[in-house]
Image: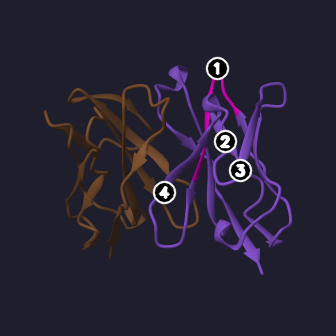
Amino acid sequence: AQRVTQPEKLLSVFKGAPVELKCNYSYSGSPELFWYVQYSRQRLQLLLRHISRESIKGFTADLNKGETSFHLKKPFAQEEDSAMYYCALSGLAAGNKLTFGGGTRVLVKP
Amino acid sequence: ETGVTQSPTHLIKTRGQQVTLRCSSQSGHNTVSWYQQALGQGPQFIFQYYREEENGRGNFPPRFSGLQFPNYSSELNVNALELDDSALYLCASSLQGGSYGYTFGSGTRLTVV
C-alpha cells in the first residue's frame, strides 16, 4: 500500500532563511508526486508536481527515487509562505487516487 | 473557467441521521474524488468517480456512498452518521489520470452531535 510521511508537524523559520519540508513515500511502481498548499482560510491548491520540474513561488522539489523522497525547498522564505503544506502521491497502481501526508505547518517569522 | 464548488459549507447533523453533500466539478474535468479531512490530519481518500462509475475506493465503510451525474457533478452520501464522521469533506476534480493535479473545493464542514 502507498504511504506518504511528513515527519515535521511544524517548521518555524525567520524571513529570508531557507526552508525545507521533508516528504518520504512508499509506493510500488512509478509514482506521481505533488505538493499542495493551504493558506489561511483558503482551499487546498496545487503548488507543484514532479513531472513538470517547475519552480513555483520560489519553491522546488526533486524526486529522489533512491531515497523515496520528494522534499520541498525554498532558499529564502517569505512571510506569505506561512501555510499548511501537504505532500501527496498518485499513480496508476494506486488507481490515480491521491494519498496525502499528514501535513507540515510552516510559520515564517518576521 | 469555474472551479470546484461544494455545498453546503457547514452542516450539523445528529448521530444516526443521513447526509448528502454536493460537488460541482471544474469545467472540463471528468473525474471527481472525495476526501475526508479530520482535524489536524491530511485528507483521506474516500472514493473516486469517472463517467458515473466508482473507480476507486479507500478504507471507508459502505455507509459512505456516492454518485456522479452526466454533467460530472457528484454527491457524497453518508448513512447512519457517527460522531467520528465529523470532519471537513473535500471534493476534487481532475482529468482522468490526475497527472496535471487535482482542483479542490473549499469543503463542507460536517459536525455530528
The tag earlier along the polypeptide, 1 or 2, is 2
Q: Secondary structure at mark 1?
A: loop
Marks 3 and 2, how far apart at CA: 19 Å
The tag earlier along the polypeptide, 4 or 3, is 4
Q: Which residue is mark 4?
A: A44
- Quadrant in the picture for residue B19: bottom left
- Image location of residue A60, percent across then percent down: 73, 44
Residue drawn at point x = 86 percent, y = 66 percent: A17
Residue drawn at point x = 66 percent, y = 27 percent: A27
Q: Which residue is mark 1?
A: A30
Q: Give the amino acid at mark 1.
A: Ser
**Labels 3 and 2 in the same subunit:** yes
**Circles 3, 2 touching at the beta carbon (< 8 Å):** no
- Quadrant in the picture for residue A9: bottom right
**What range of the chain is rendered magenta?**
A26-36
Residue drawn at point x = 61 percent, y = 31 percent: A52
**Chain hosting mark 2:** A
**Labels 4 and 3 in the same subunit:** yes
Q: Which residue is mark 2?
A: A4
**Circles 2, 4 touching at the beta carbon (< 8 Å):** no
Q: Which residue is mark 3?
A: A59
- Image location of residue A95, percent across then percent down: 46, 25
The brown-tinted chain is: B
Marks 1 and 3, how far apart at CA: 23 Å
Mark 4 vs mark 3: give the one in front: 3
In front of the other: B13 or B54: B54
Q: Is residue B99 left or right of residue B92?
A: right
Q: Residues within 10 Å of mark 4 (few under 14, many from 20)?
A: many
